[in-house]
Amino acid sequence: MKPLDPRLIRRARAARNYMILTATLGVVMSVAVVFQAMVVARLVGTLASGGQTSPGWLRNGLIAVAVIVSVRVAAAWTQERFAHRAAIDTIAELRGAVLNHVVALGPRAQAEDGAAKAAQLVTRGLDALEPYFTRYLPQLLMVVTVTPILLIVAGFVDWIAAVIMFVTIPLIPVFMVLIGRLTEAYSARQLRTMTSLGAQVMDLITGLPTLKALGREKGPARRVRRLSQAHQKATFGTVRIAFMSGAALELIATLSVALVAVSVGLRLQAGHMALVDGLAIIMIAPELFLPLRNVGAHFHASANGVAASNRAFELLAIPLPVVGQTPAPDLASAAIVFEDVSVKAPGRDYLAPADLGFRLEPGSLTALTGPNGAGKSTAVEVLLGLTRPDQGRVLVETADGEAVELTQIDPASWWEQIAWAPQRPVLLPGTVIQNLLEVYDSTPAVTPEVAKAARAAAFDTVVDELPQGWNTLIGQGGVGLSVGQRQRLALARAFWSDRPLVILDEPTAHLDPATEARILESIAALHRQGRTVLLVAHRPSLLSQAHQAVAVRSTAFSEALP
Amino acid sequence: MSRRTGAPDRGPEAHPTAGAAAKSTPKAAASTSSTAISATATSTAAAAEPRTAPTGPDPNTLPAVRRPLRRAVALTGLKTGQLLAAVFFGALTQAASVALAGTSAWLIVRASQMPPVLSLQVAVVGVRAFGITRGVSRYIERLTAHRVALNGMTNLRVRLYERMAAGTGAGAAAFKRGDVLARVGADIDDVGDLVVRGIIPAAVAAVLMIGSAAAVAAFLPVAGLAVFACLALVAVGGPAATFRAARLSESMASAARADVSASCLGIIENASELRVGGQFGRAMSDLKAQEKRLATATDAVAKPSALAASLTEIGTGLALILTLVLSAAAWHAGAITATEVAVIVLMPLAAFESVAGLPAAAAQVYKSRAAAARIVALSDAGHSPTSRPSAKRWRNDHAPEGALEAKGLTAGWQEGRPVVSGIDLRLAPGEAIGLVGPSGSGKTTLLTALAGLIEPQAGGATVGDAALFDLTSEARAETVAFIAEDAHIFATTVLENLRVAKGPLTRQEGVAVLERVGLGAWLRALPDGIDTLLDSGAASLSGGERRRLLLARALVSPAQYVLLDEPAEHLDAAAGRALTAELIAAARAAGRGIMVVSHQEDTLAPADRVYRLADGALGMVRPGHPPTKPAPNARQSGDQRSGDQRSGDRPADRP
């Protein structure tokens, strides 16, 4: 594990600026520490050796100390003041990159746990970078600024003390790694036991309502106690080992400071050294080890933060599919041809859809049918160019017989011609009318065409019930609409648009028979306008409308690949 | 020198993987290392999300708790002796640090006066001894502190379980909030952290403040007073500023954070639609605006945080200046010797380390308070003084016989807020009744009351002449089985998950019942068949598989009456109908009474009678007709996988 990921600095501008600020503050701090040690040593040393101590001299010394203290206060304030903001900005930059990437990867990569991983990362995971940035990283930078600067200064003041510290500093990581290695297997085993026991206890507590409903809540109490005690023992075993490397760090650091003090004391006694130098050294020595000890203290923040950014970079490293460049043919006249299209279901050994072949003629009304899980929605994703077939291909044939493979087509020009009403349509924060027209920066008027489309989709009754009608705020922070209501909104949008291809995924799934009839009539009207309609359909009532019903089926993977 | 705010004295803090384990298994380390005492891997998640403290008038939320920290700590049964031991070693660590600084200063100034070497011997030994003591006692301190906390957390888990298990009546209200239970693990960790990172460091700092000020005062009383004042400034000001930051963060930043999270999830969930519809850019710019609000909030929070951070430097610097002035004056007056000047000036510098950790301790206390409140509320739930005395309650330990009857049954989750009222209902053995109604109409509440899990507020639910609520839990289990919609799947084998409903279930019976609910193919695909371990919370099960497993529980249950909540949820319509019919047929064949709740009336076709629940009152939809044809077999509902539906088809109000 690297303590500092260079990718983080390369990727995030906020992180870069913050590092520069923090490193600068580290240098400022070192200078302040050195001056403070020198001035205080001179003051105390002069007093102690009975030297010249006029009130003016003491006053000047005190003013110097006050100035140095102010510098240290300002540095501490600045560091903390900007650390959180830098962390938030870095997280935002990474979050944006992860979101863009995951969305561009398409629905299949998302289904193959990409979406779950990304969701965990962008909602919580990346937040682990905040303690990493505010606590760990400053100390890490102190180790590379304060510690060496103080070591060099110490070398000038008293080279023997500097050598003692120079020799002991590397011992810290050596011992920590050594202890870590020796206890690795043991602590990994302990950690597993601990995690598993902890999960078992929580499982029983979480399941208590179920146990009560079945009258079985009393028995497991003993089990909770037993598991809890075992968990306690395992955890204690883990921390006993884990704290050892910390103890090594503390012991070496303090012992080194003590050795320096003794060495300086003995040389002072022998008259080989000046008191002022000796005092300066024993003030510098603990400050030199402090960043090292702090890095150890905030190590866990680093582990979580580095793990989170690693996961982000792993995700960002997944290559994006190559995007087609050819402008899409006009779908009002072009046919879409599925040739034996198969898609491997994510994480499972079967193809859904399997060997799907059909022709979508312009102006036709086609229904995709099949049981749940057969791959109807995946077939739609393939048609939208979001998912690439594992076998077979999709061609777009223009009226004059030219055929282009869908993967070659520029997605933006393809999507411009498609109105798609998915099963669970999304609402963006905005008013109803803004969502329907997908115009969010102004308040569009409800034209007669919009009202007609809303009637056709049976969305008008939904609008009537909303507190502010068309101007009701919906989506995040506004009124929620049910899935069925959202579907009707998406239908209205599809009816209102003049896009040549309309894809409706289970458009009547949540509706009562009367509303369903209304929508079926509207679909027929859509077809009469000459637009191509593709329905994903379960219900027989929908199927009866279609010219062509295409059965989508799935097969087990082993059958498909002999 | 550097910032000292972040508990600089903690060493490689509280994580079990400081060494190579973290390097070799970063993932495991990431999930458990935020504190060594995490029972679960969720404590970081809780840390990132301190915003969901239940407040407001929602009747389902837990009641507010007074003095949550004190009461939660009382629940841990913390041993005073162990706690004092941890504080002792903590203070010893810090004292060694201060003593090291003082002795070093004395040694050096005394040595410069070139006395005989022998006269320095004591100080030389002292310096070395303090150096070693500090390292060793720090290790012991951390171990003792963790021992106390772990012990307390074990007690807390067990007591919480026992109290919740014994809870009655409105106690079930707590269970309506699944999220409260889901985060109880993280909450317990937070209470443990309160001990290790809050209480002990605060106690150690208090001891050290007095101790080191007294040590300085021994040389020069007025300097001791000055040092104490500076230490107190840091010890009071730091935590106060931290509390202010935490409050600001809760009021401003957490709402912004929640918005950002919700937007991100929305974008990921609807990625395809946003892209195809050309709305992706719009969604991203919405997110940017929210992030800007979060940044503004962060800046506001950073100001008190920065104050807390700089206070340590202010206090240390002030102490330095004051001791210099005072000791110089005293030296001039001849009140103290030269060596004492050095000791008075240099020793207090080390003392500030102990108070420097207090802002972090304050942050932990703040964080733990919400967790403690939730835990105490959970533990109190069902033990309210208005509940009936338990002696009266558990008197009935024989399973009664007769029809299940509700007469004027009024029930709800909170006293004085009935969800259903005046319900009259009769379910005879061998009968099947259905219940429909819109969501929120109280269907689940009615079932819970009929199962005897909550105390009727008026009227009653009886079997024969026994009130269900008065039965012992064993007798109640023989009488009524309630399969809740969100019932838990335990992290144990498939078989044990069925045995929850019927203890002596054989393996063959288990396999047979799984076949019956359409899980045959699924079972055969499992690595160890019916002995396969399932994940906790059943993450590895699809919605449909989970539902079928719960229905299998209903089928094996030996109870006279089975109450089923939404058996067709997450199944497609045909499979849901077939399975419900199968369950009803099985109950009839065994002469058991069954009541099925559904929001789809058509799944209830095989029932003898169907009621509708609206606004807490019951109405008849369809009076009974005798069952004519045998119910269709669930196995004919097609392959199980195709029958499952990941999303329910009830309206969801999530955008």
Image (tube, coloured by chain):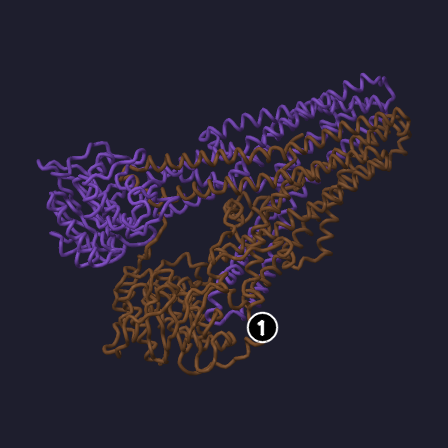
Chain colours: A purple, B brown
Number of marks in picture: 1
Q: Of A353 and B451, which appears nearest the observer?
A: B451
Q: Left or right: where does residue B630 sit relative to residue A360? A: right
For image coordinates 31% across by 69% down, the residue present is B580
Residue B370 in the image: x percent, y percent?
56, 50
| Callout 1: chain | B
Q: Is residue B651 above or below residue B416?
A: above
Q: Mark 1: which amino acid?
A: Pro
Residue B72 in the image: x percent, y percent?
62, 56
Residue B608 figure quarter: bottom left
Residue A340 in the image: x percent, y percent?
18, 48
Q: Secondary structure at mark 1?
A: loop
Q: Is residue B240 above or below residue B153?
A: above
Viewer can see residue B51: yes
Viewer can see residue A237: no
Q: Which residue is mark 1?
A: B389
Residue B405 figure quarter: bottom left
Mark 1, other Cα within 10 Å: few <14 / some 14–19 / many ≥20: few
Q: Left or right: where does residue B424 sit relative to residue A341? A: right
Q: Of A523 and B62, which appears nearest the observer?
A: B62
Q: Of A104 and A407, which appears nearest the observer?
A: A104
Residue B52 in the image: x percent, y percent?
50, 49
Q: Residue furthest left?
A: A400
Which quadrant: the N terminus of chain B? top right
